[in-house]
Amino acid sequence: MKRVGSLGSFCRVVALAVFAAPSAPAQQLWVVADGAPLQPVIDAASPGDRIQIFGVGHGEAVLTKPLDVFGGGDQPVCGRLRVRDLGCGTTLRLADLITNGIEISDCHGTILIERVLGGSWFLLSALDVTDSTGVLLRDSRFIGSGFGVSAAAMRAWRSDIVALDTRFEGAVGTPTSPAPVSGSGISLFASTALLVRCRVVGGPAQSYYDHSCPCQRVLGPTLAVFGQQDAHLTMVGDGFLGVRGDASSAGYLAAFGRMTLTLDPGVTVFGRLDVTVRAITTQASLSAPGTMAPGSSANATVTSDPGDLVALMVDLASPGAIRFPALALDVYITGNAKVLRWTTSDSAGLATLSLVVPPDPALRGRMFWLQAFAFGALGQRAASPPALLHLR
């Protein structure tokens, strides 16, 4: 455990930038009623506009401009929010919301998240930050997924984050070797995080079984740091870094790479820290048919690193919904007609996933996007280029 002089300077600069960053004057107030989609309002809004959300059923949304998005009345519930390509000198605010997770990527302005409860579903982290700076969290809570190799309460890749009075709670993990990253409270890769009066906990131990994947769910580590580039975590104030369960269990505070961990005397630590270094080589490529007939089935071959969790996303590219057969481990999302199937690649890094199309002649002429995803044992993630599938 040691201190790095540049870390404190970075934290002060980021905190000042977040608190003092000027925001564009509000131009218009938009109101999203219960059940109304959020994305059309975001698309119509101008930079600096305010968007107030009420109720539930707003779906997912992508934000690429500086806006003030906040809840009205009781905290409204919306789908996963994806913030992308926010430029320097701009500010985006998310406040008083319940979301199915937040993704931030390639953002270099100021992103302020206040009083937000973020959850996640399988394979995704509640807060996922990639190649971004100037992210400030206040009075919020993020709870990791109940399943997924790369699912954490917060996952940061090459990013800088400041959090105040915020809780990061991992969920049940999936066993990997030497210790799981899934279910972790925080997962860092080449990132810097300053946590002030924050709590970080790993997931609880729990067993489960289903007919397709019999295995033991395990305690997610509190902290997962991996890669050959340094990661920095500083905790100050009255905070907590620990696990739920037996503190003597190895790997529950797990680091799979180089890191600098600086803890204030007021931070309570519960658990044990083990450090190893692992390479990150996860990749995903897809070999699939270009055409299919309704009522037929085809195999999509996915190539990744050996032992990766491999997923195949099937997304409707033409209007209208299609219900795929309710097979084990399929997920059907009404309206988007998405099917996600997953398995584990073999020792050669190969996996085959069957795609079945309903025997409906009316489906001729429809098109789908296929895309493969690979999730490595240490939380890394890769995606193949999408392929277009025609039904003829």
Image (spheres, rainbow, N blue to C red):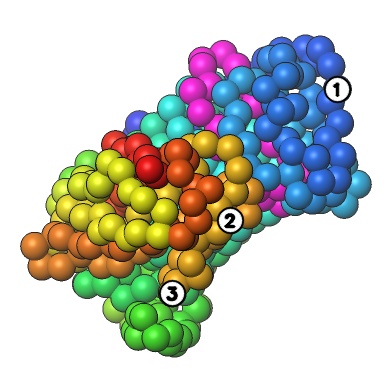
Crowding near the residue tagged with mark 2, few <14, some 14–19, many ≥20 C-alpha atoms within 10 Å? few
Looking at the image, which residue is at 70% across and 42% down?
Answer: 114
Which of discs 1 and 2 lies nearer the camera? The answer is 2
Proximity of marks 1 and 2: CB atoms separated by less than 8 Å: no
In this rendering, the answer to whether 388 lies above or below 147 is above
Image position, residue 323 (x, y; %): 55, 58
Question: Picture quarter containing residue 352?
Answer: bottom left
- Residue reaching furthest right? 73
Q: Where is residue 375 in the image (x, y as percent from the top left)?
A: 30, 56
Magenta segment: 78-100
Q: How far apart are marks 3 and 1 (CA)?
A: 45 Å
| Amino acid, disc 2 | Ile
Marks 2 and 3 sit apart, C-alpha to C-alpha, by 15 Å
Majority secondary structure in the magenta region: strand
- Residue 333: give its label: 2
Label placed on residue 328: 3
Q: Which residue in the rendered view is the most extreme toward the front? A: 361
Amino acid type at mark 1:
Leu
Q: Name the residue under label 1.
A: 29
**Does dot 2 land on a helix, a strand or a loop?**
strand
Which residue is at the front of the view, 223 or 204? 204
Residue depicted at x 79% and y 51% = 56
Residue 93 occupies which quadrant of the picture? top right
CA distance separating discs 1 and 2: 31 Å
